[in-house]
Image (cartoon, coloured by chain):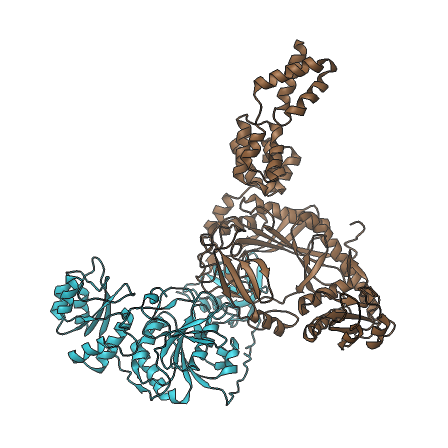
Amino acid sequence: MVSYSQKIRKLSIGKINVPDEIKVITSSKTLSGRLMPSFEDNPLSLVLKLDNGYNVGISFSKIKEICLVKKSKKTKTITRTMKSKNQLPTILLIATGGTIASRVDYETGGVIALSKPEDFLSMNPEISKISNLKILQPFNVMSENMMFSHYSELAKIIGKEIKKYDGIIITHGTDTLHYTSAALSFMFNNLEKPIAIVGAQRSSDRGSADGVQNLLCAVHYCLSDIAEVSVVMHGSSDDDYCLAIRGTKVRKMHTERRDAFRPVNDEPLAKIWPSGQLEILNKHYRKRGGCTEVNACLFNGVALIKAYPNSDPRIIDFHVKNGVKGIVFEGTGFGHVHEDWIPIIEKYCKKLFFVQTSQCLYGRTNELVYSGLRKLNDLGVINGGDMLPETAYIKLAWVLGQTSKRKDVERLMKTNLVGEINKKSLYKTFLY
Amino acid sequence: MMGIDYKKIGFKCGLEIHVQLNVGKLFCPCPSILRFDEPDYRVKRKLTPVAGELGEVDVAAKLEEIKNKTFVYEGYNNENCLVEIDEEPPHKVNSEALTTALQVALMTNMTPIDEFFVMRKTVVDGSNTSGFQRTALIAENGFVETSEGKVRITYLYLEEDAARKIKETSKSVFYRLDRLGIPLIELRTEPDIVSAQHAKETAEKIGLITRMTRKAMRGIGTIRQDVNVSIRGGERVEIKGVQDLRSMPKVIDNEIIRQQELLKIKSEIKKNKKPVFNMINVSKLFVNSKSKIIGGKECYAIKLSGFKGLIGKEINPDQRLGTEFSDYAKIYGGVKGIIHSDELPRYGINNVIILEKMLLCKKNDGFVIVIADEIVARESLKSVFERALACFKGVPKEVRNALQNGTTTFLRPMPGAARLYPETDLKPFIISEDYLKDIYSSLPQTPENELKTLIGNGLTKELASQIMKSREISLFEDLFSEFGNARIIASTILFGKDKLNKEDYKKIFSALKQGKISKEAVRDIISVVLNGNSVETAINSYESISDLLVNRKVKQVVKKCGVKGFAVVMGELMKEFRGKVDGKKLAELVKKELKNK
């Protein structure tokens, strides 16, 4: 396959680069504008930005010659230098990638990662009036590519830095944001300060970007006395307020909407307005104080599987063969599996840890109502209660990272450690 | 307007024509329907504009204003989806819209782009939920033939229409989502237009071509024409919102006069030194004034040296230079209006001499007063001052809004180039040879051929061309294919226009076909409907009277006044039967009866 730049080189004299001013001569016309990059694998056209700002593609097969008109000058990006103000609280912002920490290059249309505080603040100067930001960027990954090792790295950084700051913000892609929030929730013992995890559902190039409000509300969260790991995102489709939702009880429930992150089987901790107003919705939260301990070890050999009509239980064999020691399954309803699963679970129940959750997401699993549930209980399957499947998965990895003793694993999985299990199911929490 | 020598004054004029397409929305499956009932939901949003993309007089102030505004978007459960409210990425471009755009491109002799890119054009007034408008350049380099030769068409764009503004308060702007996303094709001509009449002709021609596709929307506001006008020594001024083609020449001629008058003011004011901004609190002069407008209120004034007599100078029918000052003060400062020296004494302001003294005015100096608190007054008077300084240069480059009476009002300064960057949620689209071949082979008729077809169907040339200009050609065709009778259908549509929907027309013509109503009744029925009655009621009240009854009546009248001749008998009968009986049929009956007598 001939690349874009090779094709351009073939048709031009001298070296032409994006975004040089060029003239493109075809059999029927001459067009001038600036050379733009192509984002296609096998580009059939040269992309030219005309003087009126529009990009057009000119088929390579029609181009006779490309001439350089003027080399583009490197444009200096003007950045406002930020002076930190001593009297203001200081917040550490850890950028991990994703929509919220990237912007579109208006000239080429490419996506660039933000790495300087100025980048974050240019869209939201309000933040610099209430806090000093420091930025760390340990890695830059799309949220679907996150691994356990990333969670551990984040926890270690936070453990090292948390004393120096008033609060911590992690910017993150939204797809797996709730796995990260669960992982970090388990990794800190005696968390002493607020940690907000923030994402954006709309890109930052547009006037309607939601990340602006999310970030500002996250800063307000960091100035509060809630010492928990929370996801801070839009509470409704309006640009009105954000919800701070406990990291173990939150899930992305919509592919695109601003208010995609909802609490499941829990109330949000707080409602936060961009003005700084903060309303506590759940009084049972951890307050600032204490001394944070980090326990960042996650065991890799865990899996999350789903039971559904016609599902093949040999998926369990596959996982066992590949070294998995703990399996969380999303059962149907109360946590059921097809009866064909039972013998296979029985086969491994002494060697493996099984955790039962429900694909209903809302409500809790049960071990008694039907005979199938009793069988699972008899085999030692751990009842996940009202835990989200994703949270149970992360928790199992964390618990197995601490111990492999059956008694301890069972006890820890059934004990509420950081708000992941509520004993009481509240009427008002359904479809919050 | 007679007497403008366009060539001599260096007249330059180009058009931008936007036509809405009735093919559903451009980037989602919602219908292109405007609704006027209560919306089902409202979503409130903020915008975060990035500095430097506004091209406004005072960017910082504008930014602040946008940040403090809440935009309220009104939607309907079934007619809108998440795409319009910026909660879902755009779907693939509406293929019918694209095909229509390419048809128009080919019919205007343009060359389609090999591969087009949907771009995001930054918009900061909240009229797009996303903060940008999606737009694509589809074709380039065409022309239309006119009586004055070729008018070149530079580009054709396919883009989404903006949300419809419902109302604005000091804190919020309300928009309805119904119009957002309706496909628009925009054609932009070169400044090849040679006169005001020629502009009208060109707009008409382009409009006609777009209607040949049968996909152009019907009704007011579905085609929008922007006119760019300049004269030698003047500046390019863009006039938006010329909805009625008939008013276009008047709007253009008025703009020419405005620019000419502003140039006269320039040569007049140039003899003076430029004024200096110095705002003075003049409230104390009016503490005890009985003037309802100004008495006891906080007010401020600036001197405009050299402007005496010029502020009151008429530059357009019913518009003075002072009107332009006032437009600026309203838009930038937010006052309701200004008071200037050339209109005094008036409004109960009689102490002009004291005012002049206070402002240190010399013989030729004018002044402007606003009634407002200090902050608003400063903003307002600053903008008046800026506008006054612009008089030294002549005509400001600006965007103006067409008014009903053929004049225009200031809207905003000419914006700089809008920021455009690729829509990252969509792939570029290759316009393949095969696709183009398909479009070529199924191209709509040219307006010239269409006219011939219509005449062939029995229309007079006059009716045929009226139907073509009326935007109702597809309605005509549908009704004609079902009911025949081209002439009556054409004249009925021209009378009823888009006030009636297709189903209404169908009911009327099927009643006619069944003989329930007479040809003469059709127009009256339409009038009854236009007065707010249902079509059914209207038809019922004009239902033809039975032949038996007509015969009996004819006999009676002939007996009574047959001796007075045919015309008198007919006149007598028509008093009762107008619209209810076919006139031709009645005449025959009368003739027969008279003969028998």
- A41 or B535: nearer the viewer: B535
- B22 or B194: nearer the viewer: B22
Q: How many marks?
A: 0
B254 over A290 or under it: above or below: above
Residue A98 position within the rendered picture, expressed as x and y whole percent measured from the top left: 41, 73
Query: Extreme right residue here?
Result: B363
Q: Determine the colour of chain B.
A: brown
Can the viewer see residue B460 in this picture? yes
Q: Quadrant of residue B341?
A: bottom right
Q: Quadrant of residue B164?
A: bottom right
Q: In the drawing, does residue B25 fall left or right of residue A144? A: right
Q: Which chain is cyan?
A: A
- The C terminus of chain B lies in which quarter of the figure? top right
Q: In the drawing, does residue A356 fall left or right of residue B176? A: left
A163 over B529 or under it: above or below: below
Residue B355 position within the rendered picture, expressed as x and y whole percent measured from the top left: 83, 73
Can the viewer see residue A26 in this picture? no
Report the residue at 51% width, 60% height from top. Answer: B73
Residue A422 position within the rendered picture, expressed as x and y whole percent measured from the top left: 28, 73
Residue B72 position within the rendered picture, expressed as x and y whole percent measured from the top left: 53, 62
Report the residue at 52% width, 30% height from top. Answer: B510
Query: Extreme top residue here?
Result: B597
Q: In the drawing, does residue A29 fall left or right of residue B423? A: right
